[in-house]
Amino acid sequence: MTLSKTDLYKEVAQQAQALMAGEKDLIANLANLSALMYMRLPDLNWAGFYLLKDQELVLGPFQGKPACIRIPLGRGVCGTAAQTGLAQCIQDVHEFDGHIACDAESNAEAVLPVYQNTKVLGVMDLDSPQIGRFDQDDMIGLQNLVNILQDAIA
């Protein structure tokens, strides 16, 4: 039996809460959450985090191929999400003005800001080789995972 997307995200959220229960360490939580997403969410070729340091995003824990190490604020999907504080759901990255191609196989991207103490700490970034991979249900499920992370590191 295949789970609905909503049920899959509920299961992943429960697993994320169990992994992060009582753990405040940022890197440990980012590492486990990126591994969990990469393992459980279908059609991903990258799942991880970039952390905001000195007005640029620096590569954090992730699963997938090697990635761009630094992304300026406002550049690409990740830099846009970090600068605006708004989640980005991009159906086709080739239509996103200023897209940074870390992996030529990535065609869709979902990026959500991560906050700590009301300031953007970084972004959660998921890439897929499948155009149109991410939709509103994904963004709701992913935002729930970000909320769990933010609560853990608060």
Image: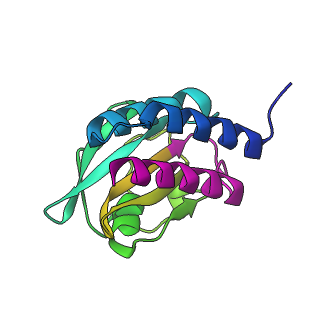
The quadrant of the rendering that contains the N terminus is top right
Which region shows up in magenta? 127-154
Note whether residue 85 is visible: yes
Report the front residue among 24 and 38.
Answer: 24
Residue 144 drawn in magenta: yes
Residue under the image location 56 percent in, 36 percent down: 44
Residue 99 drawn in magenta: no
Residue under the image location 32 percent in, 36 percent down: 61
The quadrant of the rendering that contains the C terminus is bottom left
Q: Is residue 143 left or right of residue 9?
A: left
Can you give x and y, in whole percent of width and height, for residue 39 in the image? Answer: 55, 26
Rendering quarter of residue 103: top left
Note whether residue 37 is visible: no
Q: Is residue 85 left or right of residue 69?
A: right
| 12 up-or-down from 70: above or below | above
In the displayed image of the protein, which residue is found farthest to the front?
Answer: 22
Rendering quarter of residue 21: top left
Report the front residue among 35 and 116.
Answer: 116
Can you give x and y, in whole percent of width and height, for residue 96 in the image? Answer: 49, 65
| 65 up-or-down from 57: above or below | above
Residue under the image location 38 percent in, 37 percent down: 22
Q: Is residue 13 left or right of residue 112?
A: right
In the displayed image of the protein, which residue is found farthest to the bottom?
Answer: 84
Can you give x and y, in whole percent of width and height, for residue 114 in the image? Answer: 39, 58
Residue under the image location 27 percent in, 39 percent down: 25
| 72 up-or-down from 41: above or below | below
Number of marks present in the image shown: 0
Q: Give the overall secondary structure of the magenta segment.
A: helix
